[in-house]
Image: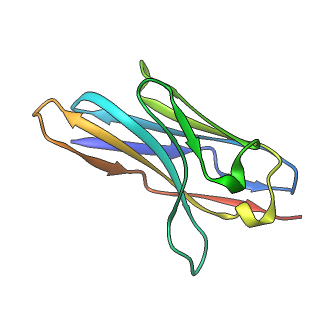
Amino acid sequence: QVQLVESGGGLVQPGGSLRLSCAASGSIFSIADMEWYRQAPGKQRDLVAAITNSGRTNYVDSVKGRFTISRDNAKKTVYMQMNSLKPEDTAVYYCKVHIRTKAASVGDYWGQGIQVTVSS
C-alpha cells in the first residue's frame, strides 16, 4: 500500500505565499517523477510543475518565476513553494508521484487534493 498526504494549503491574499508538501509512505521501493497538478472549479486538472528524480524541473508558463518545485528523496516528499500568488491560482492542488513498490508494481499515485484560495 502507498499513501500520499498533502499539506500546506489555505487562504492567502494576492501577493502572498504558500508552501505545499506531499509526503509518500508505505511499501515504496523507488520514486521517479513527482508532479503537482491543479484543478479550478469547472475546469480540467492541469499539470503545474514536475521534478525528476535527478532534480530536473519543468513548469507551466503561468507559474514560471513564481513557483518552485523541489523534493527531499530521503523523506519521500515533494514541495511546491508558491510566491506572488494571484486569484487565478485558486484551485485544488494535487500531487502525483510515479512509484515502484517493493512488490515490483509500478504506477502513478495521487494525493487527496488540497485547497488553495487566493483572495482579498
Front in this rendered view, residue 62 or 99: 62
Front in this rendered view, residue 44 or 76: 44
Classify residue 26 as left or right of residue 112.
left
Task: Tell me where residue 111 appears, x and y as whole percent.
Answer: 42, 51
**Residue 2, image quadrant:** top left
Residue at left offset 50%, top offset 26%: 55
On the rendered image, what quadrant is the N terminus found in?
A: top left
**Residue 69, image quadrant:** top right
Front in this rendered view, residue 95 or 112: 95
Q: Most extreme residue toward the left, as rendered?
A: 103
Above or below — where is 84 with respect to 90?
A: above
Above or below — where is 80 with respect to 117?
A: above
Residue at left offset 51%, top offset 73%: 44
On the rendered image, what quadrant is the C terminus found in?
A: bottom right
Residue at left offset 55%, top offset 35%: 57
Above or below — where is 48 with respect to 19?
A: below
Residue at left offset 33%, top offset 43%: 3
